């Protein structure tokens, strides 16, 4: 499955189709369907605006009607920012993405309708959809351009099964330090601090050592950083020893 089909109904500008195609490929979507593009097809402006997403542009299919564009689909979602006088289920983009993934797991073909830039989808187009999709935004200003809308839907679909951790440490060419390396560094540091008189009383030393260790643990040091810090401690200890007493 290559993700849901993106159906642009009567898009007005080639540039908007191109930027929508770029947003699609950002999110791994490649099935682009166009219903009566106003300025015709193919479009050199769309290809240029796609910024290299030519696999989407060159394989786009053009249809005369929305009905023809969705005829092979089993589930259709339609985006809208306006309340309509129609009784239809409405979900957020995130919920829609979860449902689309579930449909795809059952090998159902799914598509998402996006309306013209100026008016949005017509009621007759919405009537073809199983579910409407709305994106929670500032209620005083919900206006999105076509590519933004496609990107938001595509992003939610992509991340619905993306395994990228929410928070991780990039260590470059090094690797995270092991606990053994950290303990060795602590012992080096604490020995020099002890010799220099940092630990003023024996009863306070355990608490001070724990504070130092937790401080360095929060730094998530790499193996290279640990080796560097060993050098720092050695240099400071050596410089102190050279000073006259």
Image (cartoon, rainbow, N blue to C red):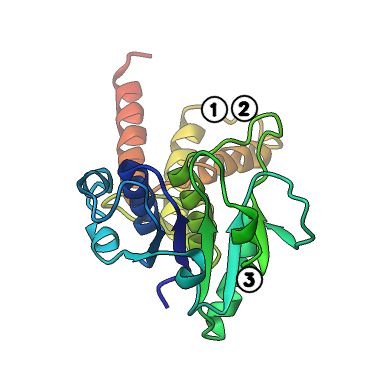
Disc 3 is placed on an element classified as: helix
Q: Residue furthest bottom?
A: 106
Residue appearing at x 59%, y 60% in the figure: 125
Disc 1 is placed on an element classified as: loop
**Disc 1, disc 2: CB below 8 Å?**
yes
**Mark closest to the chain's N terminus, 1 or 3:** 3
Mark 1 packing: few (<14 Cα in 10 Å), some, or many (20+)? few
Q: Quadrant of residue 30?
A: bottom left
Per the rendering, the mark at residue 200 is 2
- Between the C-alphas of marks 1 and 3, the distance is 61 Å
The answer to whether 142 appears left or right of 52 in the picture is right
Closer to the camera, 179 or 142?
Answer: 142
Per the rendering, the mark at residue 198 is 1
Mark 3 packing: few (<14 Cα in 10 Å), some, or many (20+)? some
Count up the numbered dots.
Answer: 3
Label 3, on which residue? 99
Q: Percent position (x, y) of residue 166? A: 54, 53
């Amino acid at each position: 499955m290559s993700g849901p089909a993106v159906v642009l109904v009567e898009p007005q500008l080639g540039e908007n189709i191109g930027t929508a195609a770029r947003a699609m490929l950002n999110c791994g979507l490649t099935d682009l369907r166009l219903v009566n593009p106003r300025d015709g097809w193919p479009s050199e402006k769309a290809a240029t605006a796609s910024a290299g997403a030519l696999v989407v542009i060159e394989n786009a299919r053009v249809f005369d009607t929305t009905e023809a564009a969705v005829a092979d689909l089993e589930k259709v979602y339609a985006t809208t920012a306006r309340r309509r006088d129609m009784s239809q289920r409405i979900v957020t983009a995130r919920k829609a993405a979860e449902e689309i993934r579930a449909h795809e797991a059952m090998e159902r073909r799914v598509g998402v309708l996006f309306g013209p830039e100026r008016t949005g989808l017509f009621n007759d187009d919405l009537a073809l959809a199983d579910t409407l999709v709305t994106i929670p935004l500032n209620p005083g200003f919900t206006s999105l351009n076509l590519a933004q809308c496609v990107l938001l839907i595509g992003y939610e679909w992509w991340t619905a099964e993306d395994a990228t951790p929410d928070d991780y440490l990039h260590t470059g060419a090094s690797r995270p330090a092991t606990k053994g390396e950290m303990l060795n560094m602590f012992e080096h540091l604490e020995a020099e601090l002890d010799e220099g008189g940092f630990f003023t009383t024996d009863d306070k030393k355990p608490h001070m050592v724990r504070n130092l260790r937790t401080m360095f643990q929060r730094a998530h040091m790499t193996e290279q950083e640990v080796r560097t810090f060993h050098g720092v401690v050695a240099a400071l200890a050596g410089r102190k020893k050279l000073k006259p007493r």
